[in-house]
């Protein structure tokens, strides 16, 4: 009997072709290329364990020595230097893009609820813009808008304001020669270490917990737009589940994807179709 010949499909091609993914195919290609880097396969498993161990030790010691081990400006400078010389430009593109995407989501909620709060302004376009406490600010923006919403009624709005859903093309400083081109997940593992050192125990806990509000934001977007699609991307991250002993880099990566999905759907609601003309440069 002749052997049954099966096809040999590529997982990566299937992911890229998946019609249920709302992201622009150029962005999907950037994400896939980043996931296929050698550092993601060989270095990430080690960096992931190392990061968790070091951060756990830092957290324990900080309960005995509860002061800031590193000024925030030093943390910013160190992380920007690391991104500039050791992380692939495409990964940096995705990181810069995330700050803009999350700001757009926060501002959409501000503009479409009666909340007494001005739109936030954190929309970096260049690698240098990730300094000046941008990481801390983008976490605080989440808390500020949620606390402000406590005083208003969140309900469906008939005429939605889709102002400022654009994403400027990021400048990852591609002209700078990289010593190594790490993928974004491995880079997050290493950057999590100075982050835990620079923040106090409570600040670090607050930053980690901010990602548990992803489901809350998706529910708010559902209420405001009347579109249940946002609920499909919930991951069961209950805001009342207060546990900071988690895989932070993995949570950050998932958080970024959830934000991308939600933002892409807002673009579709605004213009009738998912984004398809994103300018992207590939390594």
Image: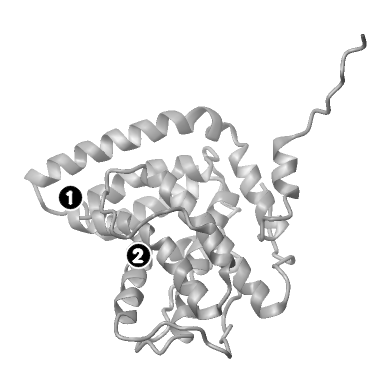
Above or below, 114 against 260 in this view is below
Q: Which residue is under mark 2?
A: 139
Q: Which residue is mark 1?
A: 69
- At x 53%, y 53%, the residue is 92
Q: Position of residue 236 (x, y in %)?
A: 42, 53
**Residue sitting farthest toward the right:** 2
For image coordinates 50% across by 80% down, the residue present is 224
Quadrant position of residue 169: bottom right
- Between marks 2 and 1, how big is the CA–CA gap? 20 Å
157, 271: nearer the viewer: 157
Q: Residue pushed farthest top?
A: 1
Residue situated in front as seen by the camera: 117 or 280:
117
- Whether 191 is drawn above or below 199: the answer is above
Residue 173, quarter of the rendered image: bottom right
Cβ atoms under marks 2 and 1 closer than 8 Å:
no
- Image coordinates for residue 18, horizontal then vertical, percent: 72, 50
- Tell me the colour scheme of the image: one colour
């Amino acid at each position: 009997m002749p052997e049954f010949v099966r096809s040999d499909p590529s997982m990566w091609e299937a992911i890229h072709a998946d019609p249920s993914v709302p992201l622009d195919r150029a962005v999907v290609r950037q994400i896939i290329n980043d996931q296929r880097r050698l550092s993601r396969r060989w270095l990430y498993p080690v960096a992931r364990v190392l990061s968790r161990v070091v951060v756990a030790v830092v957290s324990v010691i900080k309960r005995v020595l509860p002061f800031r081990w590193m000024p925030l400006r030093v943390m910013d400078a160190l992380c920007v230097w690391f991104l500039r010389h050791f992380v692939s430009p495409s990964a940096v593109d995705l990181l810069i893009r995330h700050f803009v995407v999350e700001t757009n989501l926060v501002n959409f909620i501000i503009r479409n609820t009666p909340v007494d709060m001005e739109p936030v302004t954190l929309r970096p376009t260049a690698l240098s813009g990730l300094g000046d406490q941008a990481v801390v600010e983008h976490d605080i923006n989440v808390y500020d808008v949620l606390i402000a919403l406590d005083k208003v009624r969140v309900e469906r709005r008939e005429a939605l304001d889709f102002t400022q859903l654009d994403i400027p093309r990021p400048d990852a400083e591609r002209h700078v020669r990289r010593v190594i081109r790490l993928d974004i997940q491995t880079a997050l593992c290493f950057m999590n270490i100075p982050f835990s050192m620079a923040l106090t125990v409570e600040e670090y806990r607050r930053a980690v917990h901010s990602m548990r509000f992803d489901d809350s934001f998706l529910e708010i977007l559902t209420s405001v737009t009347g579109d249940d699609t946002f609920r499909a991307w919930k991951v069961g991250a209950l805001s009342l589940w207060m546990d900071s002993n988690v895989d932070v880099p993995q949570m950050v990566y998932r958080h970024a994807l959830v934000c991308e999905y939600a933002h892409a759907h807002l673009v579709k609601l605004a213009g009738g179709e998912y984004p398809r003309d994103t300018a992207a440069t590939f390594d």
